[in-house]
Image: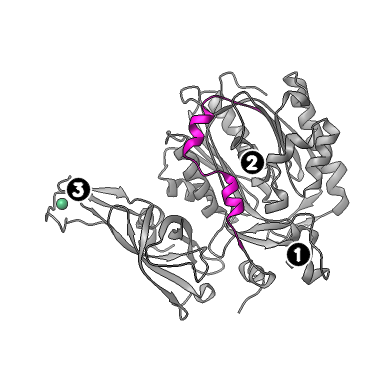
């Protein structure tokens, strides 16, 4: 596990983002400055676990994946809007190729992202599946 | 064994991966047709392992238990992704739990009930108020071996709590019976287990399960007819029915919890998932027998009594039946790719 992955593991494991308690805006990835009200007050910008459900805004199916993900093709990648309005990009799993569609409801699952090698550490994180 | 104070189940959840391999697929390759005694088995996807399945089951069980402070996270499994490095700490981190005991248990197919028993003791002694016990496996079977027909994947999680947290059922008593019996084993560094075929029956499964259950019945002065339901470890569809008959339980008592025909044997999750399917339909006052079996060998038996609160608690959960029915069938070549047998 790389140091940066270890440091941000809650972000990958639980989708920990931020909430600005000044204007109630929520963000993922976490922020230091609120882009809505421009607050930089550290006591007002807190960690917050993002909702685990959302809908597919857009998607693509990859047949030429990034290095290390060759065994996962066809790989379904979606832009998801969570129930609090925050958007993120994530892999959709356990889904037949014809079943993915814009507007479908999805929920967060905890999955293996990749492993460094057969003897290396395993990286875990969030993905989504249809619900 | 009984605790001095009451220990309850306050939340439970099962996780069964979506993929199913029909056993006719295996038979087609190795025996030229037919199917196994079970119809299909659940298979972990390429990105699922016992850690991911544990997190999914645990998350839902904790919600059902109303998010109590968890003082123990125990993961029972024999398919750990790391030989050295606990699974339980990854699960705890993913649940946001840190002030907790965390440990991995291994005892072939009975590591899950063992975790339940230890947590029951920790709560009963007053050391902790709530703990989560997991039975979870991605079981391995050598291609062509009889185990390949049944070795499957799944997870079962139970939140156990003290009297402060009103339960949906409580543990009346439990027992354990062990002996050195080498019916099934896997040496360090080996990918697949070995077993002594017929030896897995009488001297192993039947002897240990019968012993733990008879001890339990004696301890609580009960007879098989006192139980509404009974759940036995399910290495195949036949063994649990046979042991039930030998002990005086009926087929009707087993039916709801007998999942092997549809999902195979997810080892440490096998009898715990059977208990979950049973809790999904049980009524207040019902008495449930749970008996696990782990090769090597041992059996844990529990008497669990369902309480009124189960009706409320069940309102917001998805029954296990839905996960069993909502599946995607795969063929043998996809299966070998997922299990890392077929590589580019
Ligand atoms: Zn703001």
Circle 1: is it few (<14), some (14-19), or many (20+) Cα within 10 Å?
many
* Residue matched to label 2: B272
In this rendering, the count of numbered labels is 3
Identify the residue at the far left of this view.
Answer: A38
Query: Chain for mark 3?
Result: A
Cα gap from disc 1 to disc 2, whole angstroms: 26 Å
* Residue matched to label 1: B24
Magenta range is B304-328
Q: Is residue B214 something that shows in the picture? A: yes
Note whether B185 is above or below B98 in the view shown: below
Q: What label sits on residue A24 in the rendered view?
A: 3
Quadrant, the N terminus of chain B: top right
Residue at mark 2: C-beta within 8 A of ligand 1:
no
Q: Is residue B320 magenta?
A: yes
Residue at mark 3: C-beta within 8 A of ligand 1:
yes
Left or right of residue A95: residue B339? right
Q: Name the residue: 82% across, 38% down.
A: B243
Residue at mark 1: C-beta within 8 A of ligand 1:
no
């Amino acid at each position: 596990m790389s140091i940066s992955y270890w440091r941000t593991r809650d972000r990958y494991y639980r989708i920990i983002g931020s909430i600005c308690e000044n204007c109630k805006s929520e963000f993922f990835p976490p922020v230091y400055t609120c882009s809505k009200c421009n607050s930089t007050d550290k006591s007002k910008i807190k960690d917050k676990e993002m909702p685990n459900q959302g809908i597919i805004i857009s998607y693509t199916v990859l047949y030429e994946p990034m290095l290390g993900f060759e065994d996962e093709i066809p790989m379904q990648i979606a832009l998801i809007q969570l129930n609090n309005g925050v958007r993120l990009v994530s892999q959709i799993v356990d889904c037949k190729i014809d079943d993915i569609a814009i507007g479908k409801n999805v929920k967060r699952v905890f999955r293996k992202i990749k492993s460094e090698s057969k003897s290396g550490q395993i990286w875990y994180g969030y993905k989504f599946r249809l619900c | 064994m009984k605790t001095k104070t009451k220990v309850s189940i306050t939340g439970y959840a099962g996780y069964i991966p979506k993929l199913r391999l029909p056993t006719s697929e295996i038979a087609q390759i190795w025996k030229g047709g037919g199917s196994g005694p079970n119809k299909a088995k659940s298979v972990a996807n390429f990105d699922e392992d016992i850690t991911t399945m544990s997190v999914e089951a645990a998350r839902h069980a904790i919600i059902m238990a109303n998010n109590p402070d968890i003082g123990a996270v125990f993961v029972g499994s024999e398919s750990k992704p790391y030989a050295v490095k606990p699974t339980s700490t990854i699960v705890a981190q993913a649940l946001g739990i840190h002030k907790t005991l965390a440990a991995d248990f291994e005892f072939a197919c009975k590591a899950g009930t063992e975790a339940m028993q230890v947590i029951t003791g920790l709560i009963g002694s007053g050391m902790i108020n709530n703990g989560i016990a997991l039975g979870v496996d991605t079981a391995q079977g050598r291609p062509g071996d009889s185990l390949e027909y049944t070795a499957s994947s799944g997870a079962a999680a139970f939140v156990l709590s003290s009297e402060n947290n009103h339960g949906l059922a409580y543990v009346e008593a439990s027992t354990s019976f062990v002996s050195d019996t080498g019916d099934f084993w896997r040496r360090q560094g080996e990918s697949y287990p070995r077993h002594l075929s017929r030896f897995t029956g009488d001297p192993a499964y039947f002897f240990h399960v019968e012993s733990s259950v008879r001890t339990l019945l004696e301890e609580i002065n009960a007879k098989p007819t006192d139980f509404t339901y009974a759940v036995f470890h399910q290495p195949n569809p036949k063994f649990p029915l046979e042991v039930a008959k030998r002990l005086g339980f009926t087929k009707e008592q087993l039916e709801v919890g007998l999942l092997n025909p549809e999902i195979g044997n997810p080892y440490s999750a096998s009898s715990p998932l059977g208990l979950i399917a049973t809790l999904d339909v049980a009524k207040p006052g019902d008495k449930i027998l749970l008996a696990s079996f782990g090769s090597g060998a041992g059996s844990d038996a529990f008497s669990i009594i369902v309480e009124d609160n189960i009706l409320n608690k069940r309102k917001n959960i998805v029954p296990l039946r839905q996960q069993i029915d909502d599946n995607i069938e795969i063929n043998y070549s996809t299966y070998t790719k997922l299990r890392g047998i077929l590589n580019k």
